């Protein structure tokens, strides 16, 4: 389930692209498939990295000077990369989990080349507020969300680091009701028939991508989208 829209995050041949907090690989693998680039995924969770490596096996291509793939276990607060070493950085649904997220933003600014692109996505405020209101466990579970971002404030914070904002959209509207249901029936969510049925619907949508649900979600995203996705360009020194 991609959150980043590569139509707004164009990948040029030979780009070095970092997926920071790559998890099980959805964006780092998608970026690799999308273009002739070097795609690098970083995460703290070894199990997620192993899953990403397994999933990548289905998309692996013979290495060439423009196309490569790599995964690394690293801390977002202290990335093992040189200054100005990436052309693009993705940080999707990660910042809400990290106590010192401002330090992560500074690391992103450090490793991104001048003129490079940065895509950040976080849970949208009002759908997230409903989740928090319905279930305390939702955000207090280990590894859960530590804060609710107001997109305008996060956007300003990133801009203050020397980035130019150029686009915003919302994503995953069909997932908002699913998470509200999970939060409303948190203790019994694994056996709740309504949640199970909704999950089957989401899997069907993900696998088959029927025109009806794709059109429905596109129409609902501005109103109901669970994630807000923002795109920035790092300033080039005068």
Image (cartoon, rainbow, N blue to C red):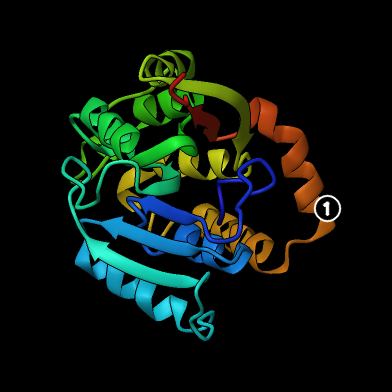
Whether residue 117 is situated above or below residue 58 in the rendered picture: above
Q: Label 1, secondary structure: give it.
A: helix
Instruction: Return the x and y of residue 92 as percentages of the image width and height.
Output: 43, 43
Q: Residues within 10 Å of mark 1 (few under 14, many from 20)?
A: few
Which image quarter: residue 204? bottom right
Instruction: Return the x and y of residue 124 as percentages of the image width and height.
Output: 49, 28
In front of the other: 117 or 226: 117
Whether residue 171 is situated above or below residue 64 in the rendered picture: above
In front of the other: 57 or 166: 166
In front of the other: 175 or 36: 36
How many numbered tags mark residues here? Answer: 1
Q: Is residue 56 visible?
A: yes
Instruction: Return the x and y of residue 160 as percentages of the image width and height.
Output: 38, 14
Quarter of the image with the N terminus in it: bottom right
Residue in the picture at 69% in, 46% down: 7
Residue in the picture at 18% in, 31% down: 99
Residue in the picture at 19% in, 52% down: 80
Instruction: Return the x and y of residue 184 as percentages of the image width and height.
Output: 41, 37
Which image quarter: residue 106? top left
In front of the other: 214 or 44: 44
- Looking at this view, name the residue that lies furthest to the bottom: 62
70 vs 1, left or right, is left
Residue in the picture at 18% in, 40% down: 77
Q: Is residue 96 visible?
A: no
Residue linked to disc 1: 212
């Amino acid at each position: 389930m991609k959150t980043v829209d590569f139509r707004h995050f164009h990948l040029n041949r030979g780009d070095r692209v970092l997926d920071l907090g790559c998890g099980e690989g959805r964006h780092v693998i998608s970026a690799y498939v999308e273009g002739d680039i070097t795609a690098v995924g970083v995460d703290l969770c070894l199990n997620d990295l192993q899953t990403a490596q397994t999933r990548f096996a289905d998309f692996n291509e013979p290495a060439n000077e423009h196309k490569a793939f790599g995964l690394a276990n690293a801390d977002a607060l202290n990335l093992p990369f040189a200054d100005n070493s990436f052309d693009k950085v993705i940080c999707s649904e990660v910042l809400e989990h990290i106590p010192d997220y401002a330090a992560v933003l500074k690391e992103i600014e450090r490793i991104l080349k001048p003129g490079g692109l940065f895509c950040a996505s976080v849970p949208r405020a009002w759908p997230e507020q409903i989740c928090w209101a319905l279930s305390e466990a939702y955000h207090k579970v280990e590894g859960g969300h530590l804060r609710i971002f107001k997109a305008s404030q996060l956007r300003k914070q990133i801009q203050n680091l020397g980035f130019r904002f150029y686009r915003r959209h919302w994503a995953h509207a069909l997932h908002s009701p699913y998470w509200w249901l999970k939060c409303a029936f948190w203790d019994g969510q694994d056996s709740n028939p309504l949640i199970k049925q909704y999950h089957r619907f989401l899997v069907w949508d993900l696998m088959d991508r029927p025109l009806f649900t794709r059109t429905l979600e596109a129409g609902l995203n501005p109103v109901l989208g669970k994630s807000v996705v923002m795109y920035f360009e790092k300033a080039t020194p005068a």
